[in-house]
Image (spheres, helix red, strand yellow):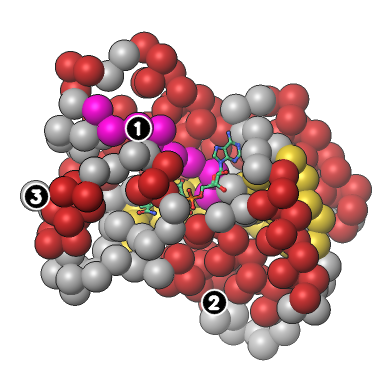
Amino acid sequence: MPKTPDYFAGKSIIITGAASGIGRATALIFAREGANVVCTDINEQGARDTAAAVNAAGSQALALKTDVTSRAQVDDMARRAIAAFGTVQFLFNSAGAAIRRAKFLEIDDALIGKTFALNVNGTFYAMQAVLPHMLANKHGVIVNMASMAHRRGGPGSSIHYAAAKGAVVSMTMGVAREFASQGIRALSISPGPIKTPFQDAAQSSPELIQRFLEDVPMKRFGAPEEIGELVLFMCSDACAFMTADTVYVNGGGGWR
Ligand SMILES: NC(=O)c1ccc[n+]([C@@H]2O[C@H](COP(=O)([O-])OP(=O)(O)OC[C@H]3O[C@@H](n4cnc5c(N)ncnc54)[C@H](O)[C@@H]3O)[C@@H](O)[C@H]2O)c1
């Protein structure tokens, strides 16, 4: 929650991966607070549907088809967001995926390349596209989606993904510290399993999903809104001294 009740009214956020899951839930939470929401995703119809839901909640939205693995498309996303709303205060990089599950010796060049292109390059391009604007305004908050996988290492199913999210955690820390004295904050979030289409997209087996569940001390998956509310807090004026770190949201751990 913000310290100032109407803190988000009229301010703007760009959300990548806004068509689904955590990105969509976060878009609706920012809409509830009166923020303008730039809903971007490689899934154009999904981005439009989220934008329509933002509008239905009474806030302004812009839907954009953006593949975050393309620097040109990400630059265009930033330009159009700034043109639409004048100022962009917040960036939430939610676009990401494990692509597919694989044991370490079965991770080929294509899989590791795609995983890094989406999770690492996508986050890198978006931060580079939006930071000059934020620096000119002497204010901006960037929240990046990492994963608890970066701490577990992803043995047996997702070392490619865990390593990519590790890079997101490091890059977030570096950006936060490089620009800390210029009004910029950057944080990452490292969730445990969250109930979204993410596991379907990664073709996770029912056995793997069950293992994740058993490993969570609270014995349930998180809801995407339980991440979205944290993004809101991180972006708010109640969180002004927090930057650089990753925050775990995982029902109590599960570090095996
Ligand atoms: N759900 C989980 O259990 C979980 C756990 C830890 C971290 N995460 C991370 O949270 C983030 C959001 O995941 P989610 O659970 O909402 O999954 P999701 O599959 O519901 O949403 C991911 C969104 O990213 C979009 N996307 C995929 N490739 C893209 C590209 N190249 N350009 C733009 N958009 C693209 C998809 O179209 C989709 O709308 C991801 O970064 C994911 O790695 C998820």
Question: Does residue 193 show up?
Answer: yes
Instruction: Name the residue rendered at 17%, 56% in the picture.
Output: 210
Q: Quadrant of residue 11?
A: bottom right
What's under tag 2, amino acid-wise?
Ala
Is the shortest distance between ligand 1 and the CB of mark 1 under 8 Å?
Answer: no
User: Number of labelled discs?
Assistant: 3
Q: CA distance from mark 3 to mark 2?
A: 34 Å
What's the mark number on residue 256? 3
Mark 3 or 2, which is nearer the eye?
3
Please indicate whether residue 104 sits to the left or right of residue 147 in the image: left
Residue 234 lies within the magenta run:
no
Q: CA distance from mark 1 to mark 3?
A: 21 Å
Magenta region, residue range? 91-102
Instruction: Name the residue rendered at 71%, 59% in the picture.
Output: 49
Magenta stretch, main secondary structure class? loop
Q: Identify residue for label 2.
A: 238
Q: Identify residue for label 1.
A: 100
